[in-house]
Image (cartoon, helix red, strand yellow):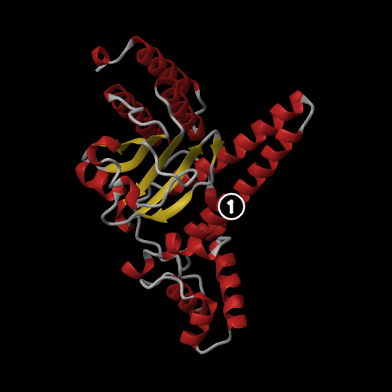
Amino acid sequence: MTSMLSEAALRALRHADQLIQEADRGDVFAVYDTCRATLGSIAALDDFYVALINEADRRISYPYLFSNGRYEEGGTVTYAPNGLTAWVIASRRPYRYADDEGALLNRGYRFGDGEPSADTVVVPLLGSGDGAVIGLMSALSDTADAFTDETVRAMEWLAGLVVDRLRANHPTRGLNLPLVYPELDDAGRSGTLMALNTAGNALTRMAQELTALAEAATDEHLAERLAELSRRCFGVQAQLVTRLGPKHDAPVDPLQGLSPRERAVAELVTGPDGDPGNAGIAAALGISPATVKTHMSSLLDKLGLEHRSELRWVVGHARRH
């Protein structure tokens, strides 16, 4: 492999290897951050993410999202059976924008600022043994033809480093989540997704407030400290999603903790015909629009969500199990 890489790429990858080896064994965020910075030194990178896959229930978790100079909120959603994630899982090989001019990529929801990327590479994180795909690493650029064969090889090598670190951290290392989130041990509820979304939303809000304070601060030392605290919030979030993402346990029904009426509202919102709105839900269930609002507020709170539009991502897979 090394003979196919430029000297600049070799230096960047060796430096990344050194940084990752020196990072604290529990600091997966630093590993993801290093991969993103390394690729950014090799190619024109605008967006970058690392995702972890639970193929048993088509769940994909995002412990690390970075777009246009900012960390973004991670979380867990369901991937489509005919989309990019499913394709990489089936083929076990990298996807490149040039393969189909982005057709497969653009079937899904936009990442980052919502605009289509001009170039993309997605490489699988391959587990040991059977080589099953346990996650993805993706680089996206607003510049056409930004990523070369060298970029793909560099990403595959970095993906190997990530897998080595995940193998070392899971399941014996990482956060003792049940100590802080006892609902994770409650098999009768969808505690995993509830805790993940609730904690993730809280950490994101905290990080955003710290970032705003850092940008407004006039004291340079204080600004640096606030920025570091913001990064640490995203770091804890990354550990949460990493710890929860690669499990291969029984599928979790995220609607299980809802009341029968709340569940009925959620199923109508995420149905095949799309969200019918409060008036449509009220007509279907024989209740008032005001009561629909009450049920909606309650179920969003239980699932740790802020907007009803997030329901399709979080609970869309429940009806398939």
Question: Splitting the image into 4 quarters, where does residue 20 fall?
Answer: top left
Q: Residue at x 30, y 56 (%)?
A: 56
Near mark 1 (Cα within 10 A), the count class, few <14, some 14-19 or many ≥20, is some
Q: Quadrant of the N terminus?
A: top left
Give above or below for 279 relative to 182.
below
Instruction: State the image coordinates of residue 193 (x, y, percent, origin top left).
Output: 48, 58
**Residue farthest to the bottom?**
286
Q: Is residue 11 in sight in this rendering?
A: yes
Give above or below for 55 relative to 24.
below
Question: Splitting the image into 4 quarters, where does residue 166 fall?
Answer: top left
Instruction: State the image coordinates of residue 241 (x, y, percent, origin top left).
Output: 47, 46
Residue for badge 1? 201
284 relative position to 224: left or right: left
- Number of residue marks: 1
Q: Quadrant of the C terminus?
A: bottom left
Q: Residue at x 48, y 40 (%)?
A: 65
Q: Is residue 94 in sight in this rendering?
A: no
Most foreground residue, 162 or 155: 155
Give above or below for 166 relative to 202.
above
Instruction: State the image coordinates of residue 79 (x, y, percent, origin top left).
Output: 35, 54
Most foreground residue, 135 or 114: 114
Q: Secondary structure at mark 1?
A: helix
Q: Specify the amino acid type for callout 1.
A: Asn
Q: Residue at x 41, y 70 (%)?
A: 274
Instruction: State the image coordinates of residue 148 (x, y, percent, origin top left).
Output: 30, 25
